[in-house]
Amino acid sequence: MSDILIRPAAESDIPRLEALLYQVHGLHAEGRPDLFIPGCKKYTADQLRGLLADTVNTPIFAAILDSELVGYCFCVRQVQSAASMQKISTLYIDDLCVDAAMRGRGIGKVLYDYAVDYARENGFYNLTLNVWACNPSAMRFYEKCGLAVQKVGMELVL
């Protein structure tokens, strides 16, 4: 989608980032109300300011369409450091969201591709993310993007 601009998120984007964080959290709260509290969001404004300030370890990308922030991709730099494993640098997608009213227009793919390009250009070994099992549309999206299952988390609710 050529009319989508991806740029680093800025502190002035916080109100719009918060609105989208509520959307994502709402999906999770609907799918797993035992874990996610309805009406909440993942980060406070102060936490967002801290994440935005650390562009090396927590890059955040904003998708802009017609001067409006319509999506984001929160990333985290991770380094594998277990003595028994290869030391690798991973770009972890902590959260990727496109405004519900804008989904299906290719914005998520543009954001995802931008994160992949960023990871390649910055020497990361891989890109990883987690998807909640209660979000099958996200699972299908990431599979279409070429991601494969790396590991599976399992639980027993007691």
Image: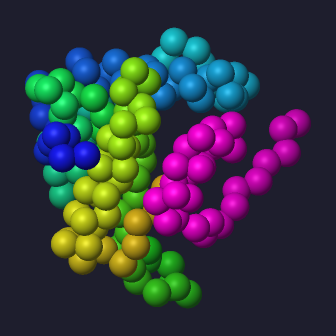
Q: Position of residue 114 (x, y in %)?
A: 25, 56
Seen from the viewer's position, the closer of residues 16 and 158 is 16
**Residue 81 is covered by the magenta coloring:** no
At a point 36% along the width and 43% down the height, the residue shown is 106
Residue 58 lies left or right of residue 134; in this view the side is left
Seen from the viewer's position, the closer of residues 139 and 82 is 139
Quarter in which the C terminus is drawn: top right
Q: Position of residue 74 (x, y in %)?
A: 33, 45
At a point 35% along the width and 74% down the height, the residue shown is 89
Figure check: 1 above or below 64:
below
Q: Which residues are magenta?
A: 130-158
Q: Position of residue 10 (x, y in %)?
A: 12, 34
Residue 5 lies left or right of residue 100; in this view the side is left
Quarter holding residue 49: top left
**Residue 141 is covered by the magenta coloring:** yes
Seen from the viewer's position, the closer of residues 152 and 54 is 152
Q: Position of residue 72 (x, y in %)?
A: 30, 38
At a point 52% along the width and 49% down the height, the residue shown is 141
Residue 27 visible here: yes
Residue 8 visible here: no
Q: Main secondary structure of the magenta part?
A: loop
Q: How many marks?
A: 0
Residue 63 lies left or right of residue 88; in this view the side is left
Q: Residue furthest right?
A: 158
Residue 68 lies left or right of residue 135; in this view the side is left
Seen from the viewer's position, the closer of residues 86 and 81 is 86
At a point 48% along the width and 28% down the height, the residue shown is 24
Figure check: 54 above or below 11:
below
Applied colour scheme: rainbow
